[in-house]
Amino acid sequence: MAAAAAIGGVGVVAMSAVADDTTSGTQPVAKTLKQIPAVTEVPGAIAERFAVLQQPSSERYSRNGDAHAESILASAGGNTGLARRTGEASAPATWLVPGDQEVCLVAEDIDKRYPGARALTCDTLDRVDRNGLYLATGERAKADVRGIVPDGVDTVTVYFAKGATSQVPVVGNGYRFTTTTEPATRMSWTDTNGETTSVTLGLLP
């Protein structure tokens, strides 16, 4: 299961979605998480699935001193020094952090009311490789959704409650979309092998 935290008093849903339109919810994080040594380089299996982690970057992940967030990253063996920013450059910063057989996603600036507020989640490479990983913050009809997908995916299709769809570009393994009046219910993507993954969105009420 995914471990997740919202920093700054903001509600968050974090999931590694399961194919066939079902989702696995986020379980509460224990007060004490077992910490493991941070990886010193991007593990080969993770690098093979997320090309953005092999690219040079002029930006560096900035820790905000939140002990709970750091404990989640530490429980996954996450090394923020190896993190890479995903998604479009004009969007709020979202980071992919490699760990020891796990992948973490950190979203910054998730609520303008709380400067510095961020959300994060981690899950196993196997699950993220199959089904992606995303964070949803805000309200169901006014949500900010950010996620990552493995290499070979160019766009994510978002399905809305009243039948409309939208194509969202994938940049550096990451994507982002927002809802304004109508909730999104599902999303899907197709990789270069022609395999399609479809997941139900678990958004906030």
Image (spheres, grey):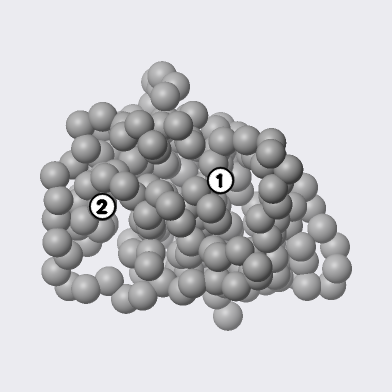
Q: Tell me if I can see residue 6 in this picture.
A: no
* The C terminus: image quadrant: bottom right
Q: CA distance from mark 1 to mark 2?
A: 19 Å
Relative to residue 115, is residue 196 drawn left or right? right
Q: Nearer the viewer, residue 10 or 42?
A: 42
- Disc 2 crowd rating (10 Å Cα; few below 14, some 14-19, many 20+) is many
Relative to residue 34, is residue 143 drawn left or right? right
Q: Is residue 39 above or below residue 160?
A: above
Q: Nearer the viewer, residue 203 or 89?
A: 203
**Residue drawn 21% across and 37% down?**
39
Upstream in sequence: badge 1 or badge 2: 2
Q: Position of residue 50 (x, y in %)?
A: 48, 35
How many numbered discs sit on the rendered protein?
2
- Give the residue type that dot 2 points to: Ala
**Residue drawn 37% across and 54% down?**
124
* Residue corresponding to mark 1: 149
* Residue corresponding to mark 2: 76
